[in-house]
Amino acid sequence: MGAITLRAPAKINLTLDILGKRPDGYHDMRMVMQAVSLGDTVTVSEAGEGFSLSAEGIDLPAGKVTLEQQAAEAFFRALNRPMPGLRVLLEKRVPAYAGLGGGSADAAAVLRCLRRLYAPELPREALEEIGLSVGSDVPFCVRGGTCLAEGRGEILTDLPPLPDCAIILCKPNFGLPTPELFRRVDGADLGTRPDPAAMGAALERGELSSAAACLGNVFERVLTEQEGAEIRSIKDLLLRGGALGAAMSGSGPTVYGLFDHPDRAAQALELLKGRYRETYLAHPVKKFSQAE
Ligand code: C5P
Protein backbone atom coordinates (compact mmCIF):
# COMPACT_ATOMS: atom_id res chain seq x y z
CA MET A 1 0.00 0.00 0.00
CA GLY A 2 1.44 3.38 -0.98
CA ALA A 3 0.91 6.78 0.52
CA ILE A 4 -1.62 9.32 -0.70
CA THR A 5 -1.18 13.06 -0.28
CA LEU A 6 -4.13 15.41 -0.79
CA ARG A 7 -4.73 19.07 -0.12
CA ALA A 8 -7.24 20.09 2.53
CA PRO A 9 -8.62 23.51 1.60
CA ALA A 10 -10.06 25.74 4.31
CA LYS A 11 -13.54 27.23 3.84
CA ILE A 12 -15.09 30.62 4.27
CA ASN A 13 -18.76 31.35 4.86
CA LEU A 14 -20.03 33.79 2.26
CA THR A 15 -23.28 33.83 4.22
CA LEU A 16 -24.11 32.25 7.58
CA ASP A 17 -27.58 32.21 9.12
CA ILE A 18 -28.89 30.23 12.08
CA LEU A 19 -32.55 29.28 11.79
CA GLY A 20 -33.09 27.84 15.28
CA LYS A 21 -32.09 25.31 17.91
CA ARG A 22 -33.06 21.68 17.30
CA PRO A 23 -34.21 19.02 19.75
CA ASP A 24 -30.83 17.24 19.34
CA GLY A 25 -28.95 20.31 20.63
CA TYR A 26 -27.53 21.34 17.24
CA HIS A 27 -28.77 24.34 15.29
CA ASP A 28 -30.39 24.43 11.86
CA MET A 29 -28.14 26.43 9.58
CA ARG A 30 -28.38 28.05 6.18
CA MET A 31 -25.01 29.05 4.81
CA VAL A 32 -23.14 29.54 1.58
CA MET A 33 -19.71 27.96 1.87
CA GLN A 34 -16.71 28.48 -0.39
CA ALA A 35 -13.49 26.44 -0.40
CA VAL A 36 -10.31 28.52 -0.58
CA SER A 37 -6.71 27.86 -1.62
CA LEU A 38 -5.33 28.36 1.90
CA GLY A 39 -5.09 24.76 3.02
CA ASP A 40 -3.22 22.03 4.82
CA THR A 41 -1.67 19.00 3.15
CA VAL A 42 -2.58 15.55 4.44
CA THR A 43 -0.66 12.34 3.76
CA VAL A 44 -2.07 8.96 4.74
CA SER A 45 -0.09 5.71 4.55
CA GLU A 46 -0.54 2.21 5.88
CA ALA A 47 2.11 1.55 8.49
CA GLY A 48 2.67 -0.25 11.78
CA GLU A 49 -0.19 -0.75 14.19
CA GLY A 50 -2.89 1.57 15.48
CA PHE A 51 -3.22 5.19 14.43
CA SER A 52 -0.47 7.77 14.53
CA LEU A 53 -0.73 11.45 13.67
CA SER A 54 2.14 13.86 13.32
CA ALA A 55 2.10 17.46 12.23
CA GLU A 56 4.60 19.97 10.96
CA GLY A 57 3.78 23.42 12.20
CA ILE A 58 1.63 22.67 15.27
CA ASP A 59 1.57 20.88 18.59
CA LEU A 60 -1.04 18.15 18.58
CA PRO A 61 -3.57 18.07 21.41
CA ALA A 62 -2.49 15.43 23.91
CA GLY A 63 -4.83 12.77 25.25
CA LYS A 64 -7.69 13.49 22.83
CA VAL A 65 -8.95 11.33 20.00
CA THR A 66 -8.29 13.69 17.11
CA LEU A 67 -10.81 14.42 14.35
CA GLU A 68 -8.40 12.66 11.96
CA GLN A 69 -8.52 9.45 14.02
CA GLN A 70 -12.31 9.72 14.43
CA ALA A 71 -12.57 10.04 10.64
CA ALA A 72 -10.40 6.95 10.02
CA GLU A 73 -12.33 4.87 12.57
CA ALA A 74 -15.69 5.99 11.13
CA PHE A 75 -14.48 5.13 7.61
CA PHE A 76 -13.58 1.52 8.42
CA ARG A 77 -16.69 1.11 10.59
CA ALA A 78 -18.84 2.16 7.61
CA LEU A 79 -16.97 -0.28 5.36
CA ASN A 80 -17.36 -2.97 8.01
CA ARG A 81 -13.63 -3.69 7.82
CA PRO A 82 -10.98 -3.75 10.55
CA MET A 83 -8.80 -0.63 10.55
CA PRO A 84 -5.24 -1.31 9.44
CA GLY A 85 -2.30 0.50 11.05
CA LEU A 86 -2.33 4.06 9.69
CA ARG A 87 0.08 6.95 9.72
CA VAL A 88 -1.21 10.46 9.01
CA LEU A 89 1.09 13.42 8.42
CA LEU A 90 -0.28 16.96 8.39
CA GLU A 91 1.40 20.02 6.98
CA LYS A 92 -0.51 22.72 8.81
CA ARG A 93 -1.07 26.13 7.31
CA VAL A 94 -4.66 26.90 8.31
CA PRO A 95 -4.95 28.45 11.76
CA ALA A 96 -6.97 26.32 14.22
CA TYR A 97 -10.13 27.56 15.98
CA ALA A 98 -10.36 30.32 13.42
CA GLY A 99 -13.76 29.79 11.72
CA LEU A 100 -12.01 28.39 8.63
CA GLY A 101 -12.88 24.72 9.13
CA GLY A 102 -9.21 23.68 9.33
CA GLY A 103 -9.83 20.63 11.52
CA SER A 104 -12.86 19.60 9.44
CA ALA A 105 -10.84 19.97 6.23
CA ASP A 106 -8.09 17.70 7.62
CA ALA A 107 -10.63 15.07 8.70
CA ALA A 108 -12.28 15.26 5.26
CA ALA A 109 -8.90 14.91 3.55
CA VAL A 110 -8.18 11.79 5.64
CA LEU A 111 -11.50 10.35 4.37
CA ARG A 112 -10.65 11.25 0.77
CA CYS A 113 -7.18 9.66 1.13
CA LEU A 114 -8.70 6.51 2.65
CA ARG A 115 -11.22 6.27 -0.19
CA ARG A 116 -8.35 6.44 -2.71
CA LEU A 117 -6.41 3.75 -0.82
CA TYR A 118 -9.19 1.34 0.13
CA ALA A 119 -12.51 2.03 -1.65
CA PRO A 120 -12.09 4.09 -4.86
CA GLU A 121 -15.66 3.28 -5.93
CA LEU A 122 -17.23 4.62 -2.72
CA PRO A 123 -19.57 7.42 -3.84
CA ARG A 124 -19.02 10.93 -2.58
CA GLU A 125 -22.43 10.91 -0.82
CA ALA A 126 -21.36 7.95 1.33
CA LEU A 127 -18.11 9.69 2.22
CA GLU A 128 -20.04 12.85 3.17
CA GLU A 129 -22.30 10.79 5.42
CA ILE A 130 -19.29 9.27 7.19
CA GLY A 131 -17.95 12.84 7.49
CA LEU A 132 -21.08 14.03 9.31
CA SER A 133 -20.39 11.57 12.13
CA VAL A 134 -17.09 13.44 12.68
CA GLY A 135 -18.37 17.04 12.49
CA SER A 136 -21.01 19.28 10.94
CA ASP A 137 -18.62 20.98 8.47
CA VAL A 138 -16.90 17.76 7.34
CA PRO A 139 -19.44 16.85 4.59
CA PHE A 140 -18.82 20.20 2.87
CA CYS A 141 -15.06 19.72 3.23
CA VAL A 142 -15.41 16.30 1.54
CA ARG A 143 -17.15 17.97 -1.41
CA GLY A 144 -15.33 21.33 -1.68
CA GLY A 145 -16.19 24.07 -4.16
CA THR A 146 -19.22 26.27 -3.46
CA CYS A 147 -22.38 25.02 -1.75
CA LEU A 148 -25.52 26.03 0.03
CA ALA A 149 -25.33 24.07 3.31
CA GLU A 150 -28.45 23.43 5.37
CA GLY A 151 -29.46 21.23 8.30
CA ARG A 152 -26.44 20.91 10.59
CA GLY A 153 -24.40 21.73 7.49
CA GLU A 154 -24.72 18.36 5.75
CA ILE A 155 -27.58 19.07 3.32
CA LEU A 156 -25.49 20.36 0.43
CA THR A 157 -26.60 21.95 -2.83
CA ASP A 158 -23.91 22.82 -5.36
CA LEU A 159 -23.75 26.47 -6.39
CA PRO A 160 -21.79 28.17 -9.17
CA PRO A 161 -18.30 29.07 -7.93
CA LEU A 162 -17.39 32.47 -6.52
CA PRO A 163 -15.74 34.29 -9.47
CA ASP A 164 -11.96 34.21 -9.23
CA CYS A 165 -10.72 36.90 -6.87
CA ALA A 166 -8.14 37.58 -4.18
CA ILE A 167 -9.32 36.73 -0.67
CA ILE A 168 -7.46 38.23 2.27
CA LEU A 169 -8.01 36.31 5.51
CA CYS A 170 -7.04 37.91 8.80
CA LYS A 171 -7.27 36.18 12.18
CA PRO A 172 -7.10 38.43 15.22
CA ASN A 173 -5.41 37.02 18.27
CA PHE A 174 -8.39 35.94 20.37
CA GLY A 175 -10.55 32.83 20.48
CA LEU A 176 -14.29 32.50 19.96
CA PRO A 177 -15.26 28.97 21.05
CA THR A 178 -17.95 27.63 18.70
CA PRO A 179 -20.30 26.07 21.33
CA GLU A 180 -20.16 29.31 23.38
CA LEU A 181 -21.15 31.41 20.33
CA PHE A 182 -24.07 29.07 19.56
CA ARG A 183 -25.21 29.50 23.19
CA ARG A 184 -25.13 33.29 22.78
CA VAL A 185 -27.32 32.98 19.67
CA ASP A 186 -30.13 31.18 21.51
CA GLY A 187 -32.82 33.75 22.29
CA ALA A 188 -30.78 36.65 20.82
CA ASP A 189 -32.21 39.12 18.30
CA LEU A 190 -30.16 38.43 15.19
CA GLY A 191 -31.59 41.37 13.23
CA THR A 192 -31.53 41.41 9.42
CA ARG A 193 -30.50 38.05 8.01
CA PRO A 194 -28.10 37.43 5.14
CA ASP A 195 -29.93 36.49 1.93
CA PRO A 196 -28.56 33.21 0.51
CA ALA A 197 -30.96 33.40 -2.48
CA ALA A 198 -29.50 36.79 -3.46
CA MET A 199 -26.02 35.29 -3.02
CA GLY A 200 -27.00 32.31 -5.20
CA ALA A 201 -28.33 34.67 -7.89
CA ALA A 202 -25.11 36.75 -7.81
CA LEU A 203 -23.04 33.56 -8.20
CA GLU A 204 -25.33 32.43 -11.02
CA ARG A 205 -24.63 35.72 -12.83
CA GLY A 206 -20.90 35.43 -12.05
CA GLU A 207 -20.89 38.91 -10.50
CA LEU A 208 -18.23 39.28 -7.84
CA SER A 209 -19.36 42.74 -6.74
CA SER A 210 -22.99 41.58 -6.25
CA ALA A 211 -21.78 38.54 -4.31
CA ALA A 212 -19.57 40.78 -2.17
CA ALA A 213 -22.60 42.97 -1.40
CA CYS A 214 -24.46 39.90 -0.02
CA LEU A 215 -21.83 38.71 2.50
CA GLY A 216 -23.18 38.31 6.02
CA ASN A 217 -22.78 36.27 9.20
CA VAL A 218 -25.24 36.36 12.12
CA PHE A 219 -22.49 35.33 14.56
CA GLU A 220 -21.23 38.92 14.20
CA ARG A 221 -24.41 40.01 16.03
CA VAL A 222 -23.56 38.16 19.25
CA LEU A 223 -20.00 39.41 19.78
CA THR A 224 -19.07 41.31 22.94
CA GLU A 225 -18.29 45.03 22.64
CA GLN A 226 -14.56 44.33 22.56
CA GLU A 227 -14.72 41.39 20.12
CA GLY A 228 -17.09 43.31 17.83
CA ALA A 229 -14.81 46.39 17.83
CA GLU A 230 -11.81 44.36 16.66
CA ILE A 231 -13.80 42.50 13.98
CA ARG A 232 -15.20 45.83 12.71
CA SER A 233 -11.78 47.42 12.66
CA ILE A 234 -10.37 44.60 10.47
CA LYS A 235 -13.40 44.87 8.16
CA ASP A 236 -12.80 48.64 7.90
CA LEU A 237 -9.14 48.10 7.01
CA LEU A 238 -10.10 45.59 4.31
CA LEU A 239 -12.84 47.83 2.87
CA ARG A 240 -10.67 50.96 2.94
CA GLY A 241 -7.97 48.87 1.23
CA GLY A 242 -10.34 48.20 -1.66
CA ALA A 243 -12.22 45.03 -0.67
CA LEU A 244 -15.62 44.79 -2.40
CA GLY A 245 -17.04 43.22 0.76
CA ALA A 246 -15.85 41.74 4.06
CA ALA A 247 -17.31 39.44 6.73
CA MET A 248 -16.37 37.15 9.59
CA SER A 249 -16.08 33.46 8.61
CA GLY A 250 -17.95 30.76 10.56
CA SER A 251 -17.77 31.24 14.33
CA GLY A 252 -14.74 33.48 13.83
CA PRO A 253 -12.64 35.23 14.64
CA THR A 254 -11.14 35.24 11.11
CA VAL A 255 -12.36 38.10 8.92
CA TYR A 256 -11.96 37.99 5.15
CA GLY A 257 -12.29 40.48 2.32
CA LEU A 258 -12.88 39.88 -1.42
CA PHE A 259 -10.78 41.88 -3.90
CA ASP A 260 -11.08 42.16 -7.67
CA HIS A 261 -7.73 44.04 -7.93
CA PRO A 262 -4.67 41.88 -7.19
CA ASP A 263 -2.55 45.00 -6.49
CA ARG A 264 -4.98 46.35 -3.91
CA ALA A 265 -5.14 42.90 -2.32
CA ALA A 266 -1.33 42.76 -2.15
CA GLN A 267 -1.25 46.18 -0.46
CA ALA A 268 -3.98 45.23 2.01
CA LEU A 269 -2.10 42.00 2.77
CA GLU A 270 1.05 43.96 3.69
CA LEU A 271 -0.88 46.48 5.79
CA LEU A 272 -2.81 43.83 7.74
CA LYS A 273 0.22 41.57 8.14
CA GLY A 274 1.95 44.43 9.94
CA ARG A 275 -0.81 44.33 12.58
CA TYR A 276 -1.93 40.69 12.52
CA ARG A 277 0.63 37.90 12.13
CA GLU A 278 -2.03 35.43 10.91
CA THR A 279 -2.97 37.15 7.66
CA TYR A 280 -3.14 35.19 4.41
CA LEU A 281 -3.86 35.62 0.71
CA ALA A 282 -6.04 32.97 -0.97
CA HIS A 283 -8.32 32.35 -3.96
CA PRO A 284 -11.58 30.41 -4.43
CA VAL A 285 -11.06 26.72 -5.32
CA LYS A 286 -13.31 24.32 -7.20
CA LYS A 287 -15.15 21.19 -6.16
CA PHE A 288 -13.02 18.01 -5.92
CA SER A 289 -13.26 15.22 -8.47
CA GLN A 290 -13.83 11.61 -7.32
CA ALA A 291 -10.07 11.01 -7.67
CA GLU A 292 -9.12 13.86 -5.33
O1 C5P B 1 -20.57 19.27 14.60
P1 C5P B 1 -19.45 19.83 15.39
O2 C5P B 1 -18.84 18.83 16.34
O3 C5P B 1 -18.39 20.50 14.55
O4 C5P B 1 -20.05 21.00 16.27
C1 C5P B 1 -19.36 21.61 17.36
C2 C5P B 1 -20.36 22.29 18.27
O5 C5P B 1 -20.95 23.40 17.60
C3 C5P B 1 -21.51 21.42 18.68
O6 C5P B 1 -21.24 20.71 19.86
C4 C5P B 1 -22.62 22.43 18.92
O7 C5P B 1 -22.45 23.05 20.16
C5 C5P B 1 -22.34 23.48 17.87
N1 C5P B 1 -23.12 23.31 16.62
C6 C5P B 1 -24.47 23.58 16.60
N2 C5P B 1 -25.18 23.44 15.43
C7 C5P B 1 -24.56 23.08 14.29
C8 C5P B 1 -23.17 22.83 14.28
C9 C5P B 1 -22.47 22.95 15.45
O8 C5P B 1 -25.06 23.92 17.63
N3 C5P B 1 -25.28 22.99 13.15
Image: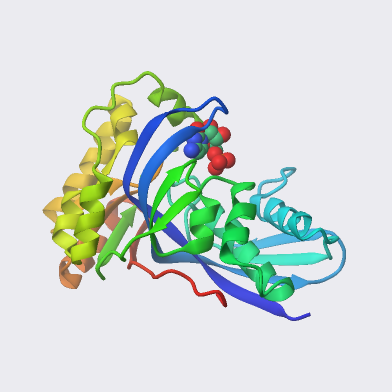
Viewer-proximal residue, 27 or 65?
A: 27
Residue 116 falls left or right of residue 180: right
Across the whole image, how many numbered discs are drawn on residues? 0
Q: Is residue 201 above or below residue 215?
A: below
**Residue 70 seen in this snapshot:** yes
Which quarter of the rendering shows the C terminus?
Answer: bottom right
Quadrant of the image occupied by residue 227: top left
Direction top: furthest residue: 187
Tell me which residue sits at (67%, 75%) in the image: 120
Q: How is the image coloured?
A: rainbow
Pick whichever, 224 or 25, lies toward us. Answer: 25
Quadrant where the N terminus lies? bottom right
Q: Position of residue 18 (x, y in %)?
A: 37, 34
How far from the left and from the top, in percent, is residue 38? Answer: 42, 65
In this view, the residue in front, 261 or 72, is: 72
Vertical placement of 196 versus 36: above or below? Answer: above
Left or right relative to 197: residue 213? left
How far across and down, in percent of the image, does residue 163 sit?
24, 68
**Residue 173 seen by the camera:** no
Q: Determine whether 187 is above or below 249 in the image.
A: above
Query: What residue appears at the point 54 percent right and 25 percent down from the top-left corner?
Result: 23
Q: Position of residue 60 (x, y in %)?
A: 65, 52
The one of 184 and 268 positioned closer to us in this rendering: 184
Which residue is at 25% across, 33% downward?
Answer: 229
Residue at 63% from the left image edge and 48% from the top image edge: 134
Please tell me in which quadrant of the rendered image residue 224 appears.
top left
